[in-house]
Every structure is written in structure tokens, then in C-alpha cells.
Amino acid sequence: KQEVTQIPAALSVPEGENLVLNCSFTDSAIYNLQWFRQDPGKGLTSLLLIQSSQREQTSGRLNASLDKSSGRSTLYIAASQPGDSATYLCAVLGATGRRALTFGSGTRLQVQP
Amino acid sequence: SAVISQKPSRDICQRGTSLTIQCQVDSQVTMMFWYRQQPGQSLTLIATANQGSEATYESGFVIDKFPISRPNLTFSTLTVSNMSPEDSSIYLCGGGLENTEAFFGQGTRLTVV
């Protein structure tokens, strides 16, 4: 059974810092990995999707990498801003078994002004 | 990208009653799924909604408690039956095309009193 772990669980940084969020998964048989953002009391906003054949994806100040063989992904946020404060979730879509995402427990990020 | 509308956004219900949550996608999707998110927790898959056939439930979730319908490629419902306070949670509908970006609705915040 796929398990997804995110480290750290919480992170507080001053504005302007570059930061890295980590995600690991136990079963490398995946179709893709997706990073989401969730604001308190809200739904999920998709940030980046990396297909299993890709190594990284970039969108603005966000860069996500994927090392499928080692079961790891990182989300890099450059020049963090207070508006980046949210919970970040990674999720994998398995290539075997159920056709749904398995989520990590999230990293709660606070960017201090 | 798909837009998913979920109704109601929140509700307070009496124990023993049932609530049906609707999920409407603005384009056809092959995958639709329902998740539960308890306070401070990550997302737990309830079931994948299969068009024209019974939903596929995860361990710990049963059809009698969480009946799901999916009459076409853009619509699904989840019913939370015979509710108890333990069912108080956020319920999220998600969907997407095969192996592509998944999207989620804004969630339904359910409180059972």
C-alpha cells in the first residue's frame, strides 16, 4: 500500500527566504505526483504536476523535482512571501491498484513579514 | 483546467439524518473521487466514483454509510447516511482525466450535532 510522507510537518520562515519542502513515497510505480496548496478552511489548489517520466516542473517561483526511483520529490519556493502561508500537500497517482491520489500529511508553512 | 463546484459548502445536521453532497465538473472527466479531511488531518480517500457502475470503496468505508452515484462524466453525489458527530469533517470531491492534473472542489464542511 502506497504511503506518502512529508517533512517537515510545519515550517516558519522570514519573508524572502528560499525554502524546500520534502515528500517521499514508498511505491515507485506511479503515474504522476502533484503538489497542492490548501488555505485554512478551503479546498485544494493545484500547483504543479510532474509526470513519472519527468524530472522537474516550474511555475513562477515554484519548482518541483521528482526522483521516482528513490521515491522522493521536493518543492522549492523561491523568495517566499507572506501570501505563501498555507498547507502544502503532495499526492501521488499510483500506476497499480486504485485510480486515485494518495496524499501526504502536509507541511504547514508560515512566512513571517 | 477543470472547475469543480461542490454543494453545499457547509451544513449543520442533526444526528441520525442524511446529507447528500453534489459535485459538478465543468468538463468531462474520467476520474472522480471523494475524500474526507478531519480537522488538522490530511485527505483520506472514501471511494472512487465510477460512471455507470458501483463506486470502489476504501477499507473502512461502506456503501450503506456513504452511497455514491455517478450518472455521467461530469456529476457525482456522496450521501453521508445516518450521521453521527464522528462524521463531522470536510468532504472533498476531486476529478481529472486519466494521468493528468487532478482538481478539487472547495469542500463541504459538515457538522453533526
Image (cartoon, coloured by chain):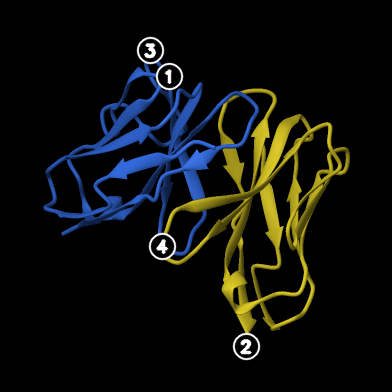
Which secondary structure, mark 1?
A: loop
Q: Which chain is blue?
A: B
Q: Mark 2 lies on which chain?
A: A
Instruction: Report the amino acid beneath label 2.
Output: Pro
The residue at which mark 2 appears reads as: A113
Say if mark 2 contacts mark 1, CB within 8 Å: no
Tell me which residue sits at (46%, 33%) in the image: B59
Q: Name the residue under label 3.
A: B53
- The residue identified by callout 1 is B50
Between A81 and A108, the one nearer to me in the picture: A81
Is label 3 in contact with label 2 (beta carbons under 8 Å)?
no
One can see residue A61 in this view:
yes
Three-letter code for the amino acid on which mark 1 is drawn = Asn
Chain at tag 3: B
C-alpha span from label 1 to label 3: 6 Å
User: According to the rendering, which colour does chain A have?
Assistant: yellow
Give residue B78's position: percent from left, percent from top: 30, 34
The answer to whether B60 is drawn above or below residue B110 in the figure is: above
The reply to whether label 3 and label 2 mark residues of one chain is no
Q: Secondary structure under badge 3?
A: loop
